[in-house]
Image (spheres, helix red, strand yellow):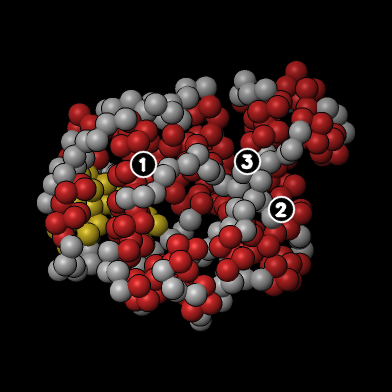
Amino acid sequence: MDDLARDGIPPKQLLAGLSLKPEDLRREGATVPFDKLAALFERAADLTGDDLIGFNRGIRRRFQRIGALAYVGLSAPTMRDMIKNTARYSQVFSDAVVINVDELDETGAVRWHFDIPVSIKRRQYLEFGAVGTVLAQRQITNRNFPLYEVCLSHPRNAGVEKFDRFFGCQTYFGARDNRLVFRQEDLDLPLMTRDEDLLPVLQQHCEDILNRKSKHRTTLVSRLERALVDRLANGSAKQEILAANLGMSSRSLSRYLAEENTTFQKVLDNLRHALADRYLTDSELSQSEIAFLLGYSSLSSFSTAYRRWNGTPPGDKRRNPTG
């Protein structure tokens, strides 16, 4: 947004009609609902006259280890495992993107679509995501590998050669689906960020959320939990941030939760409590590491919270898992 302002596009003009304010994007840990994010990219393309703004932003993107989904992908041993983890757990954190890896081992293909109304334009964001994802994969494997094939479902006439050069293969626009096809040898490239100790813990973390999602629970609480779990470790599990991510004001979120006989703090505490017990009984993570993953500023803060939940220190749970 700031670089667009330097190009003469005022933030208010960029955000007009999107129910967003400049501070919503600048705030640390800020998140934007998918429909508004997609609209923001389309608006930026219209105002700048840059029909390749998604591509141009994507090739400058830098992958950061933010959020549980990123961690569970980056901790995997190979790119193949990272893609499979991302596909399996993407629905934990967002209902907007659906990833299919059924053909990955046989043909190297990853397919995806957006589970949103057709009326929501997403061309620029789709290009940003595809380019940014491949760039990130090249960064964490330290290999500038080419793809075998790239298909994107929206039409494009101009600038196609830039996509071909970036992906290292022909890019087909107006295809039946969105598809990245990798070479099998590249899928087996090891990740520089792999962590065999952390990976199983994070996988169980995500499995727990998937199980919670499958149970008969209130829709809002389930959505809030999925949004919360990806923001605990980075300190952005704040009510105003989560409310914005869910497409409502903080006051509205409080009102809807009250109708379901709960509060934001209760949902947060219950989630932290369940994950704390999981980590203490099913992992070798230190209590300091658990405190970090749950979003506590210090071990003492985590210990105080755990005593409030269980009446005993967290060490007792580790020594007596069934107690």
Query: In this rendering, does residue 172 appear at all?
Result: yes
**Distance (Cα) linking label 3 and label 1:** 21 Å
Kind of residue indicated by mark 2: Val
Query: In this rendering, does residue 113 appear at all?
Result: no
Q: Is residue 303 left or right of residue 187?
A: right
Which of pointers 3 and 1 indicates the residue nearer the eye? Answer: 1
Check disc 2: other Cα within 10 Å, few if <14, some if 14-19, many if 20+. some
| Residue in the image at 66% along x and 28% along y | 289
Q: In the displayed structure, would residue 154 be above or below residue 165?
A: below
**Distance (Cα) linking label 2 and label 1:** 33 Å
Kind of residue indicated by mark 1: Ala
Q: Residue 195 placed where, x, y %?
A: 47, 24
Q: Which residue is mark 1?
A: 136
Q: In what element is the residue under mark 2? A: helix
Q: In the displayed structure, would residue 6 be above or below residue 108?
A: below
Check disc 3: other Cα within 10 Å, few if <14, some if 14-19, many if 20+. many
| Residue in the image at 76% along x and 53% along y | 266
Q: In what element is the residue under mark 1? A: helix
Q: Which residue is mark 3?
A: 233
| Residue in the image at 36% along x and 56% along y | 57
Kind of residue indicated by mark 3: Ala
**Distance (Cα) linking label 2 and label 3:** 16 Å
Q: Residue 204 placed where, x, y %?
A: 54, 34
| Residue in the image at 67% along x and 31% along y | 290
Q: Which residue is mark 2?
A: 267
Q: In the displayed structure, would residue 240 be above or below residue 288?
A: below
Q: Is residue 241 left or right of residue 201?
A: right
